Amino acid sequence: MGTVLGQIGTPDHMDKVSIVRFSWLLVSVLALFASVFHISSLAASEEMVELKIRLLEKVAGQDEPLVLAQPRIMSVIDRPFSIKVTPSKQSRLDQSEHEVGLKLVAKVNKLGDQRYELKLEWFRGQPMQPKDQPESEYFREEKLHARTVLQPNVPQKITLSSNRWYEVTLSLPAGNPQPQPAKQHLLLTTHIYHQSPGQDKPAWKNSPSMHLVAGKYGQFVSGGKMKSQFDETFHEIGIRMSAIAKKTDDETYLLSLELTQGNLRIQSSVPNTEVLHNDTTKLRTILKSGEKKKIEVSPTSWLELRLEEIAPSDPTPVAGSIPNAGPTRF
């Protein structure tokens, strides 16, 4: 597997402030500028590595670079791992769909003598609204393929342009995980839908997945910070999902889930106005393995949940999951 990390050049007719401001309009795009954590289920005999990737951008007038994304991943050597948060966004001008969000696939191989080979694929898609062109819209896709050799705790810089670069750091966690009694592994898939007035079909807002171990808390975090247009403050925005699935006596699972979605919208229809909105859903429900359940959370929004029993080595891509990350307060 290779690395897809990259960027498309900034259009000449769009100013920097417009790009930074409007790249955060959708919660789905927030997955790109986020801290996403993924810890795989590990056997005690397997060697672990921790990989931290930061996407940095130098902004004129600021001493410190802006952190656009900083996924942090822990997994096993020689085993591919992935993060995928890629919903689609419909064009305002026609019925076309555009992929937005984050895809990351990485694999670390041990070369010996404290040297590790990294193969990485990174995709990022984002909508942009030109500030001075209300009847125009742009969808930008950024791709970069990278293959490099890392040494523990030595940051590696991958330059994309004069003002944007990646910083990749590999570290070796102290000690090995202790053997634990075998427990059932689960894949929780969540689809978030919203039905807007006048639309024939619902909009698919996001689809986070989570790798759980029965009886242990897991957490999905995909968020970031957006700068206010009025001052120097930054607002926390994005998606946070925490869950635990406990097995019952009749071979079903009691699922407790908390989902928070935050978004800072700059309203072009109301000049000099921005609105910070957070929406939190807490629920409990009983699910069988393989069962899909639709749960209404408002008159216009609902969730589709599916819980599936999987093997610990199941290769199904898992988006930003942290088994045993809790507890979360319900």
Image (cartoon, grey):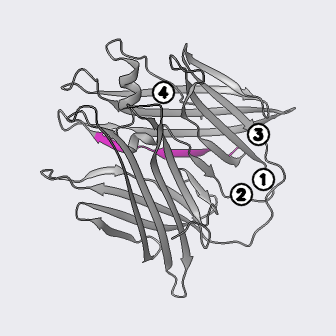
Q: Nearer the viewer, residue 274 or 101?
A: 274
Q: Nearer the viewer, mark 3 or mark 4?
A: 3
- Circle 1 crowding by C-alpha within 10 Å: few under 14, some 14–19, many from 20: few
Which residue in the structure is indicated by mark 2? 42
Q: Please give the residue where the numbered disc 1 appears in the rendered image.
A: 46
The residue stretch that appears in magenta = 78-89
Identify which residue, 330 or 288, lies in the foreground: 330
Q: Specify few, some or many for label 2: CA neighbours under 10 Å numbering under 14, 14-19, or 20 or more.
A: some
Q: Given contact means CB atoms under 8 Å apart, are the residues at marks 2 and 4 in contact?
A: no
Real-space Cα separation, disc 1 to disc 3, in angstroms: 15 Å
The first of marks 3 and 4 along the sequence is 4
Q: Amino acid at mark 1?
A: Glu
Q: Is residue 55 magenta?
A: no
- Secondary structure at numbered mark 2: loop
Residue occupied by mark 4: 143
- Pair 3/2: label in front: 3
Q: Amino acid at mark 2?
A: Leu
Q: Position of residue 222 (x, y in %)?
A: 50, 47
SS category of the residue bearing label 3: strand
**Mark 1 or mark 3: whose residue is earlier in sequence:** 1
Q: Are marks 3 and 2 in contact (CB under 8 Å)?
A: no
| Circle 4: residue type | Lys
Mark 1 or mark 4, which has the lower sequence index? 1
Q: Say if mark 1 contacts mark 2, CB within 8 Å.
A: yes
Determine which of the numbered discs, if any, sits on residue 6 in the image: none
Q: Relative to residue 294, is residue 123 drawn left or right? A: right
Can residue 319 be seen here? Answer: no
Query: Disc 3 to disc 2, how far (Cα)?
Result: 17 Å
Name the N-terminal-most of marks 3 and 2.
2
